[in-house]
Amino acid sequence: MDMTLYLFGWRWPDADINRAARRELPMPALARLWGLGRPARVPEAGLAGWRTKLAGLDPLPEAPLLLAASQPEPGYWLRMDPVTLDVQNDGLVLHALPAGSLPAADGAALLDAIARHFAGDGWQCRSVADGWFLRLPQAPAVTFTPLAQVLGRAIGAALPQGADALHWHGLLNEIQMLLYAHPVNDRRSAEGLPLVSGVWLSGGGVWPLPQSPAGLTDGVASSDALLCAIQQAAGLPVTPLPAAFAPPLRCAVLDQALPALQAANPVAWFAAWQALERDWFAPLLAAWQAGTVRSITLIAPELGESRQLAAGSRWCFWRRPALPEVRE
């Protein structure tokens, strides 16, 4: 069998941490696989850009895709992610709420408050497993910045842009004031929990889609909800990502290090890569050396590089173990 792995989360923004990773992370299996593989260039893209290219839809209609995966409804939809906004020197800085930190009852109360407040504008809000969604009577005359591009940054330059930009800036401010005065946030503040101080709108599009997305035609295992939604909308196979590599798995997307990267937590980031070494790279290397896996393709879109290992690559003694290198 052949195996393809897509790797995300290696490009830490701090060059010193990247150098420390290559120097200090004990990852002999990944180093052997990457070092032995025949190098090739691939289009450089982060996870968001890679999904967009994979789907063949730009901009990617994230909201209708995610909603259709569990509860398809016609209309124009936006993602409406609850976020924390902190006042810093350069303005309001956006942070994602920690996973599982917003109880369902609290989320329902906040979303209901938004829905009731804007009911006269024709807003309809939905909550499903993959987050909050907003249906508008028609597509707005603005563009929205993807959430992943704003995490940990000041929101000023990323606010909606276009003919109705000022109107939408005012709506976002209105939501911030509505949430600030909500009893849920009063209680969270008293308990020392991060406030739900705003929402971030992005990923707009119409369902049904004007055209079907493309995807990974041979199927893929992934924990990424949006990638799974793309595969589902394309009518292509997708399975949950297992805890570790084991045949007959043929293709997987490994993005377990991304949450720590987005949270700027280098300790958790190191731990995530060590877990991937133990659960994925070491057993994959063993399977390749035993002949259970015939060939391996490692693809790191963030670095714009891939490595291809065939059966004969075992004898390429002149190729030395090496971890992926980030060009600075």
Image (cartoon, grey):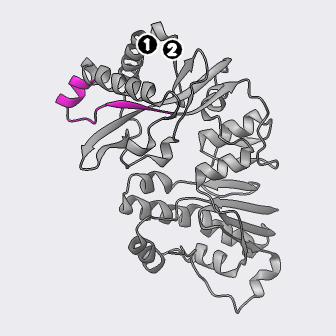
Q: Residue furthest top?
A: 120
**Left or right relative to 191: residue 156:** right
Specify the amino acid type for callout 1.
Phe
Residue 14 in picture, x, y percent from top left: 40, 68
Residue in view at x 51 percent, y 65 percent: 11
Specify the amino acid type for callout 2.
Trp
Mark 1 secondary-structure assignment: loop
Residue in view at x 73 percent, y 61 percent: 4
Q: Is any atom of residue 243 visible in this view?
A: no
- Does the stretch in magenta take in 124? no
Where is 233 relative to 186, above or below?
Answer: below
Residue 232 in picture, x, y percent from top left: 73, 35
User: Over which residues does the magenta segment extend?
Assistant: 185-201
Where is 204 relative to 147, above or below?
Answer: above
Residue in view at x 36 percent, y 43 percent: 95
- Does the stretch in magenta take in 188? yes
- Lower sequence index among marks 2 and 1: 1
Please tell me the numbered disc located at residue 118.
1
Q: Quadrant of residue 297?
A: bottom right
Q: Quadrant of residue 71?
A: top right
Q: Residue furthest bottom?
A: 318
> 251 and 211: which one is in front?
211
- Check whether the beta carbons of the residues at disc 2 and disc 1 lie within 8 A of each other: yes
Residue 110 in picture, x, y percent from top left: 37, 20
Residue 263 in picture, x, y percent from top left: 39, 52
Q: Quadrant of residue 111?
A: top left
Q: Is any atom of residue 234 visible in this view?
A: yes
Where is 116 relative to 255, above or below?
Answer: above
Please tell me the numbered disc located at residue 123.
2
